[in-house]
Image: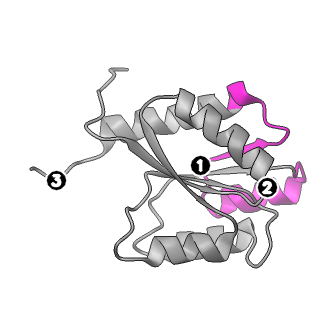
Amino acid sequence: MSVFAPTRAFHILLVEDDEADAMLIEEALLEGGERSIVQARDGVAALEYLQDPGARQPDLIVLDLNMPRMNGAELLAILKDDEQLKAIPVVILTTSQAPEDIAMAYNRHANAFVTKPVNLDDFNRAVRSIDSFYLETAATLPT
């Protein structure tokens, strides 16, 4: 597998309502290379960000399942039904180990399912595999 140097920061939308978890996840993501991170506290805020024509579309969404207003399962369903958003890779990061949550996530085309308390090695491995795929396959517009 060849490694390409990104021409811009890998942009991540972190959808997490727990501040302590968000700080830990953000630290882990920033250790992985050049990244920019935007955080949303729940599915409603994430959807507002994603539908804002002035906001930069993320290269990856890290999504908690258990949140107020709109949970991660609801947001994932909306994302994967939206023509403009469905191609964005999604890593589910949650406390749930319930088989029905894991099945739901993969049935709705999540790219990875990682449980909290997060095993940072597993999490970083999932994010790196998506990074590598993105950097090696994504077409970019000529400048």
User: Over which residues does the magenta segment extend?
Assistant: 96-122
Three-letter amino acid code at disc 3?
Leu
Tag 1 residue: 111
Q: CA distance from mark 3 to mark 2?
A: 36 Å
* Residue drawn at the location 57% of the way across and 36% of the way down: 29
Tag 2 residue: 18
Q: Which mark is residue 10?
A: none
Three-letter amino acid code at disc 2?
Asp
Determine if the magenta segment contains residue 119: yes
Can you name the residue that lies furthest to the right here?
98
Could you tell me which secondary element the residue under label 1 belongs to?
Answer: loop
Q: How many marks?
A: 3
Q: Earlier in the sequence, mark 1 or mark 2?
A: 2
Q: Where in the figure is residue 128, as x and y percent of width and height?
A: 52, 31
Determine if the magenta segment contains residue 116: yes
Mark 3 touches mark 2? (CB < 8 Å): no
